[in-house]
Image: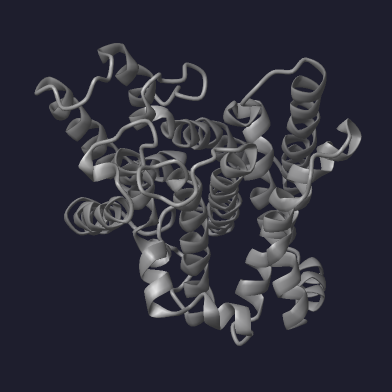
Amino acid sequence: MPPSLEQSPENLTKRLVSLDGLRAIAILAVVAGHLVGTPDYPVRDVTPRVFAMAHMGVQVFFVLSGYLITTILMGAQERRRPSILTFIRRRGYRILPAYLFYLGVLVVLRSIGLNHIQWGDFLAPVIYLSNVFPPQSWLLVHTWSLSVEEQFYVVWPILIKTLSRRLLIISAAMFVVVPSILQIVGHRIFRFQHLEEFLPTSAAVIATGCLSALARRRPSVRAKIAQIMSSQSRQVLVGLVPIAAIALPEFPTWTALLRGPVSNIAIAATISGLVDHPSSILTKLLSGRLICGLGAISYSVYLWQQIFLDRYANVSINHFPGNVIMSVCVALVSYNFVERPFLRLRDRAMPPTTN
């Protein structure tokens, strides 16, 4: 999942703090989807809408990640400091410690018999291939999204370093269009399931954020986007599009192609609105201390909620509302004692030119 704005190379100003608030909305969507069916939670029916809600949260993370990392890498490129190795190292400091801590705890719990994960299930998450070889255990299935991101970011920094701006925009557009077509063909015609977890189809979501960041580097385009999103009511309506996409009924095949891309574009437009209009109501709502605090720990919440929001288990830690409280408490421990120390170590070890 994308990291906290605490470490963004764009100066931490009021206008950017709201993006941490957007992260909070994303993790709340994931938690809301995973809560359904857990013991003592009032909603028991796990419907396709429930899965769509959790996936919408990941969708927001993906678009935001593509936007931020492209902005970061393009800024480094323009400053003639586009070191791919530096990007990989800094991202490693950001992503790996909390992730390996989570996996390490699961290994310890497995060793003492407190979970029943098959040892082979750990291999795919460790090498970031969970989207290709899905683990059988609920405690590991959410690692598919982390695998998708890391696979995408093996390719994207290289393209930024080697391609011209025009070819880069064309490449991002192809990442958006082609996977969307593959997904609709695979799902609607061949009835393949869970295609959103594979890199070719998930790349469209991340690439929408990338394309948005590239487009915004042209002053004329940025001004036009800012003008479109200047209306506060329009910002709210655009922000509600992904939620409406979940609520709407299934459409015929040809219109289903539009559901995902339209939601992705709406998320990208919302990000632009938050960045360009720091005094808007939506920006202020997403800049509150509590919601930004949740956004800051969203990566750890995403990792650890899987243990507590387990609808397939019926032990005390899985009962609502204690499962939500414990998810946040453990995430706070992970954030303060694992994530933050490594972020400080990273910033001492290398200049903050990448995420």
Q: Is residue 252 above or below residue 281?
A: above
Q: Residue at x 78, y 31 (%)?
A: 178
Viewer can see residue 211: no
In the image as oriented, which residue stretches furthest toward the bottom?
Answer: 279
Residue 133 located left or right of residue 215? left
Q: Position of residue 89 (x, y in %)?
A: 34, 42
- Frontmost residue, 220 versus 164: 220
- Frontmost residue, 9 versus 133: 133
Q: Residue at x 60, y 28 (%)?
A: 199
Residue 346 located left or right of residue 185? left
- Frontmost residue, 151 versus 116: 116
Q: Position of residue 195 (x, y in %)?
A: 65, 26
Viewer can see residue 283: yes
Q: Residue at x 13, y 28 (%)?
A: 108
Q: How many marks?
A: 0
Q: Is residue 164 above or below residue 200?
A: below
Q: Position of residue 31 (x, y in %)?
A: 44, 51
Q: Position of residue 129 (x, y in %)?
A: 45, 22
Residue 68 located left or right of residue 261? left
**Which scheme is used to colour this image of the protein?**
one colour
- Frontmost residue, 173 versus 270: 270
